[in-house]
Amino acid sequence: MLLSLTTVFTFRLPEPNLCLVSLNQMGARMLAAVLRNTGDQDLDVTDTIEVNDPGPDDVVVKITHTGVCHSDVSAMNGTIPTECPAVLGHEGAGIIDAVGDNVTEVAVGDHVIVVWSPPCGGCRFCIDHKSPNLCVTVQFGSMMLPHFTEANVPVHAMAGAGTFAEKTLLPKQAVVKIDPDIPLDIASLIGCGVMTGAGAALNTAKITPGSSVIVYGAGGVGVAAIQGARIAGAAEIVAVDLNDAKLDDARRFGATHAVKPEDVDGAKLEITGGDGFDYALECIGNPLTMRASFDAVRRGGTACIVGVGRMEEMVQFSAFELFFSEKILVGSYYGGTDVRSDFHKLLRLYKQGKLDLEGMITRRITIDEINPALEAVRNGEVIRQVIEF
């Protein structure tokens, strides 16, 4: 789950002669899934795309696996602004294929996870505010330059990642090196959905042992949030979804209760005596469930908004209730993560059997199956699908 705010901030890209990449130098064409126009229902799977050469501070990653996330659908329908044409995909892992002259952090052959919102390491968000997930220096800089070309025409990359391709070009900050014994299909999930959901529980909401938690949405991000709440030691975890199959999935990953929206009040009464939950995690991106998550927590509780809503959609609160309830309403961008350390923390939890990533993969597919996979996401049929190149 991600948000690219290219229409919110005004920034100036480098002039063409100052770009960090040069066009049409990598030579071989490759398979990629391209969004031609915002609003298209299908991606164009084509072998006409070329990846650009790395600049001095860039790397080229051979993508081996990439997850299909609901944010890819959000880029297609315009919820997440994306300049077209664009190679979609942002949740990926692979092997370093080439590096720029100034890159010493990784080398050809290293296994890495792609980071769609990388920290620069030197700004106030990275250093003074200790919130590197909020750094946009790299994301709104070199990552917004075209990564690919097609017949000498620049092609962009969703969120600066573009992992629905056999190779992608990234600034060096946008990869995290991992141990080669980590399966790359597993590693790819860390790059977005798992970090977003588990990070919201552990880093943003800061769920405490013995607490009560309600999670709205039991898709990939919601399941990760449920697992994060379980790892944090929550006593009760209530999953809310319209889909019975997803409620079954939620129980499998640690939810103690799983209910339809109309049954939330009953669960709140049973678990909290009607006071409300200590924490709510909204993993859908809908104004109605955002408001519901705020209503579900007790006075002084925390409602954490994880899902990405449309910019024009609004959530309304009474001026009095904000004062009187003393509830905390907080957004969670990329799970409040410092990718340089948190990716490894989650992978250690995976190795110890405390974070089930293998079980989150519903299907393994090829890039040719991307459009049915996207439809399955729209229909809520899967937790995660992973494309294997």
Image (cartoon, rainbow, N blue to C red):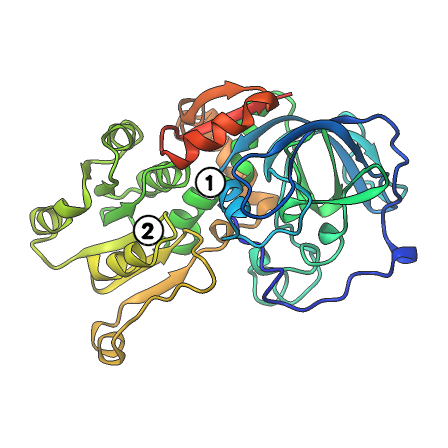
Q: Position of residue 146 (x, y in %)?
A: 77, 47
Identify the residue at horizontal 88%, vertical 29% (top origin). Answer: 27
Asked whether residue 183 appears in the rendered view, the answer is no
Q: Amino acid at mark 2?
A: Leu
Element marked by disc 1: helix
Identify the residue at horizontal 46%, vertical 38% (top origin). Answer: 194
Neighbour tally class for label 1: few under 14, some 14-19, many 20 plus, Cα within 10 Å: many
Q: Is residue 383 left or right of residue 240?
A: right
Q: State whether residue 319 is above or below residue 70.
A: below
What is the spatial separation of the Cα atoms under label 1 and label 2, in whole angstroms?
17 Å
Q: Are marks 1 and 2 in contact (CB under 8 Å)?
A: no
Q: Amino acid at mark 1?
A: His
Q: State whether residue 367 is above or below residue 53.
A: above
Identify the residue at horizontal 26%, vertical 28% (top origin). Answer: 245
In the rendered image, which residue does mark 2 sit on? 281
**Front position in the image: 4 or 296:** 4
Tell which circle, 1 or 2, labels the residue nearer the N-terminal end: 1
Question: Is label 1 or label 2 in front?
Answer: 1
Q: Position of residue 51 (x, y in %)?
A: 80, 35
Q: Position of residue 80 (x, y in %)?
A: 53, 52
Q: Position of residue 111 (x, y in %)?
A: 68, 28
Identify the residue at horizontal 29%, vertical 54% (top origin). Answer: 289
Asked whether residue 37 appears in the rendered view, the answer is yes
**Label disc, if present, on residue 70 of the rendered structure:** 1
Query: Which quadrant does the C terminus fall into?
Result: top right
- Determine which quarter of the picture holds residue 238: top left
- Determine which quarter of the picture holds residue 387: top right
Q: State whether residue 43 is above or below residue 181.
A: below
Neighbour tally class for label 2: few under 14, some 14-19, many 20 plus, Cα within 10 Å: many
